[in-house]
Structures are given as structure tokens and as C-alpha cells.
Image: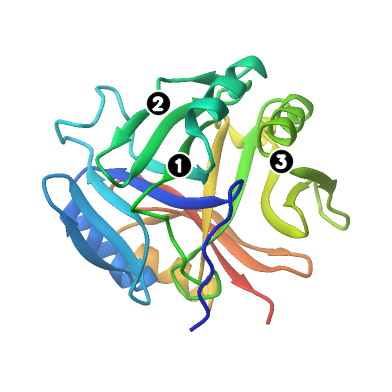
Amino acid sequence: MPLRRREPGEFCWINIVTPHPAEAQAFFAALLGWTYQPIPGMGHRCQVGGRDVGGIFDLAGPQTPPGTMPGIGVMVRVEDVDATAARAATLGGRAGAAFDIGPSGRMAECWDPTNANFDLWQPRQDQGTDADESLVGAPSWFELMTSDVDRARAFYEALFGWTAEAMPGQSMPYTTFKLGDRYVAGMMAITPEMHGVPPCWMPYFTVSDADAAAREAVRLGGSVYLGVKEAASVGRFCGIRSPQGVHFLVMQYVR
């Protein structure tokens, strides 16, 4: 199985905050094949093919800030979290104070100029995921939904050194971000048809059959908020809401 450690400027981890975490673990295990290892006193590591990809935590836990909604947080690896957080603020975003997660690493919570949230991760003992993106259940794409494409493009290019490219052949304008020669993320504008979706980062997870994943999500008590669609030359995807209220997407890639 090929392994690839994420480089600075790449998404390296996800954190799920959910009510009823035991039921949520069962849902993701059945849908995406995840397994789990305990994080004593905190939650569980989510694993794909025996490799860590993220964590899952109780929405009602004492470490969860009041008012937090169910969702999936995304983390970008950086070389210096304090310097990157400070730069995010100078570029028109916001950043909380950086703090240590024991010996694992150092992190900071950030928001871009359109209020989309993401976290920065400076690894120490915990380097983040090295799972291959092609594995079923692995996070394989990260997409920004934004209210201001131009401001967001300038922010992320300056913050992480990404290069934005317009993606041709799509039914609506779509931007990809590259780090060097590697595609790392996508971006699209929030439209009126999206009924008040706030600016946010959304992860995609690899599946072998998007239609089957949609059916299985419903069978497991979840719902499909975005029906299965084609992404030209990429694959088939859909948006799923877990029974506990966590939104995410799955992608069946063209082989």
C-alpha cells in the first residue's frame, strides 16, 4: 500500500465533532470502512487501512466550545504555526492563539476573509495522515465554498503558496488550487440555490461506488443532501448528512 506524508501547505487531518459519537463511529465504519483507536480522555482516531486520517470527538464533551455545531474540521500542515497564524490575520483573515497539543504538535484555529474555518498544524510527534487518497474511506479532496472567490483566492495563494487555476468543462465556475505540481483543493462560489450555506471547507472521501454509498447512507439512517452527479473527467460524487448531522461528500473516481 503506497503511503505519502503530507507536505507543508497540504491538508493533513480531519476532526469530526458529533453528538452520539458511538453511533457516529458505527455509521462511518459501515459506510466508509473506518476503524478506530482510542485517544485517552478525548475521543478516537479514525483509521483507513490501519493508517490514521483524523479524530472523532463528542459534541457534548467538556473540551468542545459551547455553540459548536456538528461538522468536520480540516487541518493544513505548516512549518511554523505561530508565524502562519499571524500572517493569516495580516491577509484579512482571523486566527486564534496557537497552542500545544501535548507532545503531538502545535495548532491554531483560523478563518479566511469570508469566514471559512480551518486549522493549522505544526507536527512534532504526530505528523498527520500518510494514508493513500485512493483507499476507500480516505479523505481525498477538500473544497471551499465561499461568498467571495476573488478574496479567498488571494488569501490562500498568499498564505500557503497555492496557485489557483480555473477548471474548464464544468457546469459552473470552479477553481483548483495547486501546491507545486500537486492539486490540493478546490473552490466554488456559494449560489442562491444553496439556500444560505455558510462559507466552509468540505472534505470528500473516496468510495468505490457513489450510487451505492448514497443508498447505504440512507439505509444507515443518514440522508443525501446532494444527489449523485458527474464531475467531468473526475468521477461521480454526492453529498451525505450523517444521522448525527455531519455533512460531507463522497467521490467515486474515474479509474
Q: Nearer the viewer, residue 52 or 113?
A: 52
* Amino acid tagged 3: Met
Name the quadrant of the C terminus: bottom right
Image vertical order of residue 191 relative to residue 29, above or below: above
Q: Earlier in the sequence, mark 1 or mark 2?
A: 2
* Amino acid tagged 2: Ala
Does residue 98 appear anywhere in the picture?
A: yes
Residue under the image location 42 percent in, 55 percent down: 128
Image vertical order of residue 209 relative to residue 182, above or below: below
Callout 3 secondary element:
strand
Residue 98 is marked as 2
Question: Which mark is nearer the camera, 1 or 3?
Answer: 1
Residue 188 is marked as 3
Mark 1–mark 2 distance (CA, rounded to whole Å): 10 Å
Asked if marks 1 and 3 touch (Cβ < 8 Å), the reply is no
Residue occupied by mark 1: 122
* Amino acid tagged 1: Gln
Residue under the image location 80 percent in, 43 percent down: 164
Mark 1–mark 3 distance (CA, rounded to whole Å): 28 Å
- How far across and how far down the image is residue 181, in percent? 78, 59
Q: Earlier in the sequence, mark 1 or mark 3?
A: 1
